[in-house]
Image: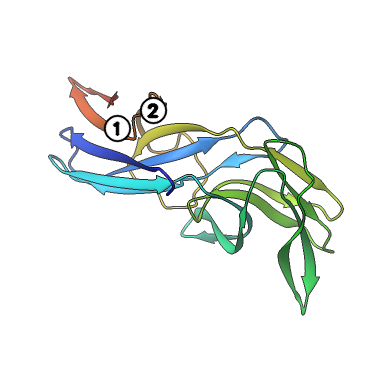
Amino acid sequence: MATKYFVTFKNESTQPSVVQFCVYQQYPDLPGLKSVAWKKAGAYMGGQATVEWVITYSAVLSNYNDEGGIGIYASSQSIGADFKDQFDITDESGIQVVKKSGTSGQDGTITITNKSNEMANVGIGMDDSLSSVIPNVYGGVEEVFQITPTYFVAAYENLEIGQLISDVGIIGKPLTLQFPSGVTKATVRLIQDGQKLNLKIEY
């Protein structure tokens, strides 16, 4: 059975509104690769909320929607993926689809090639949710994702799943989340320090 990980967020601040906590991932640099809000939970002053996941990967084709000035990437198709798997994006019946095409990629990678006639938003997901995306990949371009994610936790005034990670509306400073060997649970506290707000991780 796959190992399940848990992060509990505690809002110990005096913020007068709900704080949106999130976990996001960063992968080794690829041109255009962007992180999106992957796991999210809101907590009001004195409240707490928990997110959880298992480490399963997927190749993701996504759509971009701009609603109310907030750009969101949402999966239009997601296929489970293992290391060395290869995928092609093609055109079928007027839409883009992603299909597994092989298992002979590089060790520790997942490869996605856009073979369609249109640009595609190509990404990697974990636990059935998009975590990183390369927008507007041209037809004929192959993207090789090194699957060694680094996890981060952050707090925002407002945030939606699939929204690009940025400094807009951020509260405090994001922290690297790194579970010690054998540990699967962490607590992230948002602490009020005078006028400052800081995150603290406890394992």
Residue at 66% from the left image edge and 43% from the top image edge = 83
Q: Which residue in the protein does label 1 denote?
A: 186
The location of residue 28, given as percent across then percent down, is: 64, 30
Identify which residue, 170 or 189, lies in the foreground. Answer: 189
Q: Is residue 61 left or right of residue 119?
A: left
Name the element at disc 2. Answer: loop
Image quarter for residue 90? bottom right
Q: Is residue 182 above or below residue 122?
A: above
Mark 2–mark 1 contact, CB under 8 Å?
yes
The residue most toward the bottom is 93
At mark 1, the secondary structure is: strand
Residue identifier under label 2: 179
Q: Is residue 139 above or below residue 190?
A: below
Residue 99 image offset from top left, x and y in percent: 73, 63
Residue furthest out toward the left: 46
Q: In which quarter of the view is residue 132 placed?
A: top right
Number of numbered markers: 2
Residue type at mark 2? Phe
Q: Nearer the viewer, residue 173 or 149?
A: 149
Q: How is the image coloured?
A: rainbow
| Disc 1 residue type (three-letter) | Ala
